[in-house]
Image: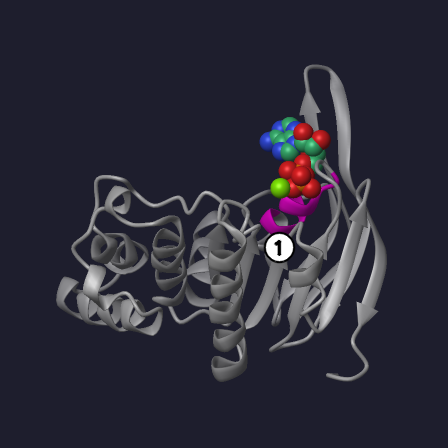
């Protein structure tokens, strides 16, 4: 369960204060599948980043299960992210000098023995159908394959929540739909909560809960009555 209550988030640029999230509240059930739409600059990425504790908020509260994200210290946030949250980004954000396997091992390496981390990473790569590309550098993989590696990297910590910021934004439509099918399969089989930003209406409408943001406010909150 993710609970967001009246969050306000602003950035300071020069002397100006830019309020990006204007009292946003949202309740996300465990195992939910949420899409988040809105024009460019409306605050979508900011919302995802504050949920994951990557950005502080001005006021309001965010709770993941029973943990108050807004008041955790850095080391507590790092632990929460490691245990509960996986991120997937539009630009994949893989380390270009590391193989697919090394990229997937990365989140766990400083915490566990490398043998155990390697086994887990291979398992995650199998999960996304890429064990045959383990030793490839990102530049030797297609866009869709790079995003699969990024999803494996998100899965390797066995998260309960996946936050995806326009995961298909850099992919052609067929490859994008394959990535969405993979995320949907992870949601259905593992009960992982997925919150995904997308510009693609067709993709957004496949989610159980659809949210729209306009100018830092939640505009529409639609729960599919068939699936709920
Ligand atoms: P979206 O993902 O919906 O396109 P963002 O959440 O990235 O929008 O950004 C919302 C607004 O906040 C934009 O006007 C953007 O310029 C501004 N913004 C985002 N990140 C920062 C930052 N780190 N510093 C200052 N302004 C920012
Ligand atoms: Mg964005």
- Residue visible at 32% across and 56% down in the picture: 107
- Quadrant location of ligand 1? top right
- Residue visible at 42% across and 47% down in the picture: 92
Q: Is residue 194 left or right of residue 125?
A: right
- Residue 135 seen in the figure: yes
- Residue 6 seen in the figure: no
Please name whichever residue, 175 or 60, is drawn nearer the observer in this view of the structure: 175
Q: Does the magenta stretch mainly form a helix, a strand or a loop? A: helix
Up-down relation of residue 190 to residue 154 (above or below): below
Please name whichever residue, 63 or 72, is drawn nearer the observer in this view of the structure: 63
Residue holding disc 1: 51
Q: Position of residue 196 (x, y in %)?
A: 61, 59
Q: Is residue 200 left or right of residue 172?
A: right
Q: Which residues are magenta?
A: 42-49
- Residue visible at 82% across and 40% down in the picture: 215
Up-down relation of residue 112 to residue 61 (above or below): below
């Amino acid at each position: 369960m993710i609970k967001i209550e009246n969050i306000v988030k602003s950035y300071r640029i020069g002397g100006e204060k830019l309020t990006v999230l204007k009292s946003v509240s949202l309740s996300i059930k465990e195992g939910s599948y949420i899409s988040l739409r809105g024009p460019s600059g409306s605050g979508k990425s900011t919302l995802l980043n504050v949920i994951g504790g990557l950005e502080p908020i001005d006021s309001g509260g965010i709770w993941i299960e029973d943990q108050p994200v807004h008041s955790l210290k850095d080391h507590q946030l790092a632990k929460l992210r490691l245990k509960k949250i996986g991120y997937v980004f539009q630009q994949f954000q893989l380390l270009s000098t590391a193989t697919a396997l090394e990229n997937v091992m990365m989140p766990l390496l400083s915490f566990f023995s490398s043998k155990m981390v390697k086994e887990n990473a291979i398992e995650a790569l199998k999960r996304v159908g890429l064990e045959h590309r383990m030793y490839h550098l990102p530049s030797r993989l297609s866009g869709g394959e790079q995003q699969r590696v990024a999803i494996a990297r998100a899965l390797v910590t066995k998260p309960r929540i996946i936050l995806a910021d326009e995961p298909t934004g850099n992919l052609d439509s067929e490859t994008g739909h394959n990535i969405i099918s993979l995320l949907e399969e992870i949601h259905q089989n593992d009960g992982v909560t997925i919150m995904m930003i997308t510009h693609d209406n067709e993709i957004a409408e496949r989610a159980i809960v659809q949210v729209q943001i306009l100018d830092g406010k939640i505009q529409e909150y639609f729960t599919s009555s068939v699936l709920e």
